[in-house]
Amino acid sequence: MLGQMMDDPLTITSIMEFADRVFRDTEIVSVTADNPRHRYTFGAAFARARRLANVLDGLGLARGDRIATLAWNDYRHFELYYGISGAGYVCHTINPRLFPEQIAYIANHAEDQWIFTDVAFVPLLEKLQDALKTVKGIVVLTSQATMPATTLKNVHCYEALIADQPDRYDWPLLNENSACSLCYTSGTTGHPKGVLYSHRSTVLHCLATSMRDVIGLAAGDTVMPVVPMFHVNAWGVVYSAAAAGARLVFPGPKMGDGETLARLINEEAVDLALGVPTVWLALVNHLRASGGAVPSLKRVVIGGAACPEALLRGLDQFGVYAHIGWGMTEMSPLGTLNTLMPWMEELPDAEKTAYRLKAGRLIYGVQMRIVDASGAELPWDGKHSGQLQVRGPWICKSYYRLDNSDAHLPDGWFDTGDVAAIDPHGYMQITDRTKDVIKSGGEWISSIEVENAAMGHPDVLEAAVIGVPHPKWTERPLLVVVKRPGTEPTKEAILAFLKGKIATWWIPEDCVFVEFIPHTATGKVSKKDLRDQFRDYSYG
């Protein structure tokens, strides 16, 4: 027997239409290259999205065609998110920080028809245009007054394109399983892989992240997504903020600068922000150096990489509560979010901090398991570590236009590539990436735990650990450190600092200092590049 309920499709259009009716006066603030502080409302944004949809329909596109964006976090990018997907096309957000060859590969693999770009990336596209096999034209996200001179072919000004279009548009009734957006992984090994999201998966992810014990946005909140809109839908905040009626503040191209972020947070009274650890390290370092504060900022969500205890405590010092989350591009991205259970608030400080530093508690909608090398499921006891696998309605079942024979397990689970432990309450702790874990003398060493311990040293700005060859133990950890400005720590002092904080045999024999640690295009430490940098290093 089937239920007798209505079956209205779950689409991004439904989020847009709801916000346009209920929250149309809620403000969106943006920092852009041509306007230091642009302000308008959800109502104005969606009116312009309808103008954009009229433009797209006039380009002769077919439903499902991919339209790419190369853009920072601002109001025009927001309009693209809704206008492209709502009109039945696929919004393909490209990470401009990737190597040019990767950008060309991604655009060609996706068969992008048009690219909407910020002015800053026009020179990049000028160099790439002959390599872009399917792109028919470029739209520059700026006004006519600031339109740059360019050698791009068939190039248009965004504001001029939409200016004469009607702001009325009949959004098509879409199948909720239709593709709405596309994002490629950062390609740390091999070519980037495309993850093709559906309207249904996106709406379900939006609803899940809106739960109070997850991100829990509400009308009256002012949220700033520092996580880029070109990376996995800005962790879904572009949708959940509209659904909740939360005020949005977009930081534009200055998203990694601590001083700029502090000023924007204070001037716009931001109370929630989301970004990778390096963003919040920059903010904390600026506040300490300047003697500043961010009194409006109550919460941040940290994802993309492990959060060192020193950063957690640094944010606490400024009255900012950090929620650590975990997910992947393949997961839309959220899988866990760290909110403490009421009884945990009464724990001693060390125990409570240990819980807060975990990757978070499993959220409803995601199934999770850990397995050993033979595939046998391991218990959720917080002690056993194994390969982390997930499944659920907003987790990809296959990569876009790739042979997926080795992407998923036969029973439908997705292997994340992470090694993790899960405790009886559903709190998950990443112990390493499968490819980064160090095997020394037949025993595993967690590079993440060694890194987090090293980051607790007051003279360490950033730390990373890789495995290097050892004549006796096969492999041993090497600690790579960036010194905090104005300090001159010795390697002996830093290694001595680790004693008592991690297992004695985990402590590296050596610590090397570098000017900077390489990062991927999404802000994570690039262990691949670090291993290349130290490929000739060995103990003995």
Image (cartoon, rainbow, N blue to C red):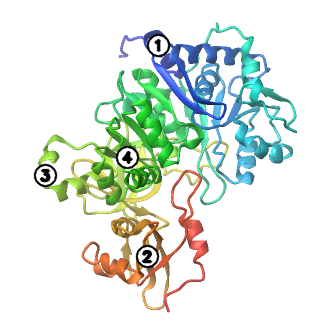
Q: Is residue 203 visible?
A: no
Q: Is the residue 220 above or below the residue 107 in the image?
A: above
Alpha carbon distance from label 2 to label 1: 53 Å
Please tell me which residue lies in front, 271 or 448: 271
Q: Say which label, 2 or 4, has the lower sequence index.
A: 4
Name the residue nearer the viewer: 167 or 109: 167
The first of marks 4 and 1 along the sequence is 1
Which residue in the structure is indicated by mark 2?
A: 488
- Depth check, mark 2 against mark 1: the one in front is 2
* Residue at numbered disc 4: 292
Front residue of this view, candidates 10 and 211: 211
Determine crowd level at label 2: few under 14, some 14-19, many 20+ residues with C-alpha closer than 10 A.
few
Q: Position of residue 409 (x, y in %)?
A: 49, 52
Q: CA distance from mark 3 to mark 4?
A: 31 Å
- Residue that badge 1 annotates: 25
Inter-mark Cα distance, 3 to 2: 37 Å
Residue at 60% x, 83% y is 536
Residue 22 sits above or below residue 339 on the image: above
Residue under label 3: 347
Is residue 216 visible in the rendered structure shown here?
A: yes
Q: CA distance from mark 3 to mark 1?
A: 43 Å
Residue kind at label 3, given as amino acid type: Leu
